[in-house]
Image (cartoon, grey):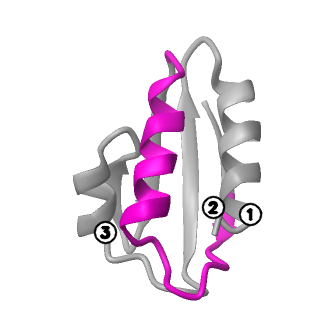
Amino acid sequence: MVSKKIIIEDPLGMHMRPASRLAKMAGDYQSKVTVKFNGKDFDCKSVMLLMTACIKHKSEIELVCDGPDEEKALAELAEFIESGMGE
């Protein structure tokens, strides 16, 4: 299992468009991908669960990947989030 803490830089936070891109990307990996926020775990492969997290601008999340491709998943998903999630 690998993890990384990340600050959300998108001014609108984790809204529908980036959440859907992130869930689609996470779905390409065999590893379990979880976002930890406010003491709760959210399945990163589910757009609806990411939306229920209500992750705002400048919030700190922890991205956790566990499985056969965890290193690659963490590197690519963290880069996507840190780069502003395509916004």
Secondary structure type for disc 2: loop
The amino acid on which the numbered mark 2 sits, given as a three-letter code, is Met
Disc 3 marks which residue?
A: 53
Q: CA distance from mark 1 to mark 3?
A: 18 Å
Label 1 to label 2: alpha-carbon separation: 7 Å
| Three-letter code, disc 1 | Glu
Residue corresponding to mark 2: 85
The residue segment tinted magenta is 5-30
In the orientation shown, which residue stands out farthest toward the top? 68
Q: Indicate which label's residue lies in the foreground, 2 or 3.
A: 2
Q: Give percent across and percent down for residue 79.
A: 76, 51
Q: CA distance from mark 2 to mark 3?
A: 16 Å
Q: Dot 1: what SS?
A: helix
> Which sits in the foreground, 53 or 13?
13
Q: In the image, what residue occupies the spot 40% across and 51% down?
A: 20
Identify which residue, 64 or 12, lies in the foreground.
12
* Crowd tier of the residue under label 1, counting other residues whose Cα lies within 10 Å: few below 14, some 14–19, many 20 or above: some
Is 40 rendered above or below residue 38? above
Q: Tell me which amino acid carries mark 3.
A: Ala
Of the two numbered discs 1 and 3 on the same chain, state the one appearing first in sequence.
3
Q: Which residue carries the number 1 mark?
A: 82
**Image quadrant of residue 6?**
bottom right
Q: Residue at x 73, y 27 (%)?
A: 71
Q: Is residue 18 magenta?
A: yes
First in sequence, mark 2 or 3: give its number.
3
Q: Does residue 50 belong to the magenta stretch?
A: no
